[in-house]
Image: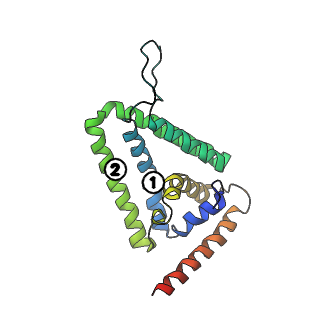
């Protein structure tokens, strides 16, 4: 699968998220996972030493900023219009998590992150186990699940609310690939039984 092939990435994601309840669960819980991950990453050591002679703070000098930036750039490379909105959301998550990190400090922040991560991941696994009846995508492609998840739930919302497509015919092509993926999965499942 090509790294910047949105159609194939979205088809892979779509094959694991066909049930509307599971999809709704992802819409509500994927972005908080990203936000809380950024929150804990604000406590990473700085990349550069702090130079007291500088008149500005190196607020971007940690892993949280780099992660938010890389996600934003990647989403922009996949689709400029939806990627711009996703990059904006990544920036908002970074700003919000930065503020929250400064307010909570490490002693409380890690506890908040732990609770948010546990609640959100539990909901995602419930969505897959009870409603989707298929293991989550992260068991088959860990990077795709972590990096693409926030962008895919955004694309789902944009498509369902506004009929958005990155280009004409995108969703019909993706749907054909999703059906092929599901058929392949069902055949492999039958061979194992």
Closer to us: 164 or 70: 70
Badge number at residue 30: 1
Quarter assignment of residue 51: top left
Picture quadrant of residue 127: bottom left
Q: Residue at x 60, y 71 (%)?
A: 178
Residue most toward the left? 107
Query: Could you tell me which secondary element the residue under label 1 belongs to?
Result: helix
| Residue sitting farthest toward the top | 53
Q: Residue at x 73, y 63 (%)?
A: 169
Quadrant including the N terminus? bottom right
Q: Is residue 110 left or right of residue 97?
A: left
Number of dots carrying numbers: 2
Of the pair 115 and 190, the residue shown nearer to us: 190
**If the image is split into quadrants, where does the C terminus sit?**
bottom left
Q: Residue furthest right?
A: 168
Q: Alpha-carbon distance for marks 2 and 1? A: 11 Å
Q: Residues within 10 Å of mark 1 (few under 14, many from 20)?
A: many
What residue appears at the point 52 percent right and 42 percent down from the top-left corner? 89
In the image: residue 183, left or right of residue 119: right
User: Horizontal and vertical percent for residue 176?
Assistant: 66, 72
**Residue 170 rendering spot, x and y as whole percentages:** 69, 62
Report the residue marked by disc 2: 116
Q: In the visual, does 62 lie left or right of 177?
A: left
Residue at 48% x, 29% y is: 60
Work out whether residue 62 or residue 15 is closer to the camera in this orientation and state it: 62
């Amino acid at each position: 699968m090509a790294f910047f092939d949105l159609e194939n990435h979205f088809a892979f994601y779509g094959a694991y998220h066909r049930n509307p309840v599971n999809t709704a669960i992802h819409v509500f819980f994927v972005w908080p996972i990203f936000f809380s991950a950024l929150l804990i990453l604000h406590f990473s050591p700085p990349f550069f030493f702090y130079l007291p002679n500088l008149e500005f703070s190196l607020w971007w000098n940690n892993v949280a900023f780099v992660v938010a930036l890389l996600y934003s750039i990647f989403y922009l490379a996949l689709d400029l219009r939806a990627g711009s909105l996703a990059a904006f959301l990544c920036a908002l998550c970074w700003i919000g998590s930065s503020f929250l990190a400064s307010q909570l400090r490490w002693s409380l922040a890690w506890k908040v992150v732990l609770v948010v991560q546990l609640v959100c991941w539990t909901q995602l696994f419930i969505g897959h186990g009870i409603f989707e009846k298929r293991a989550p995508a992260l068991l088959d492609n860990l990077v795709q699940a972590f990096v693409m998840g926030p962008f895919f739930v955004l694309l789902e919302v944009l498509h369902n609310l506004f009929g958005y497509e990155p280009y004409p015919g995108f969703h019909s092509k993706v749907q054909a690939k999703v059906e092929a993926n599901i058929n392949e999965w069902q055949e492999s499942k039958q061979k194992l039984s």
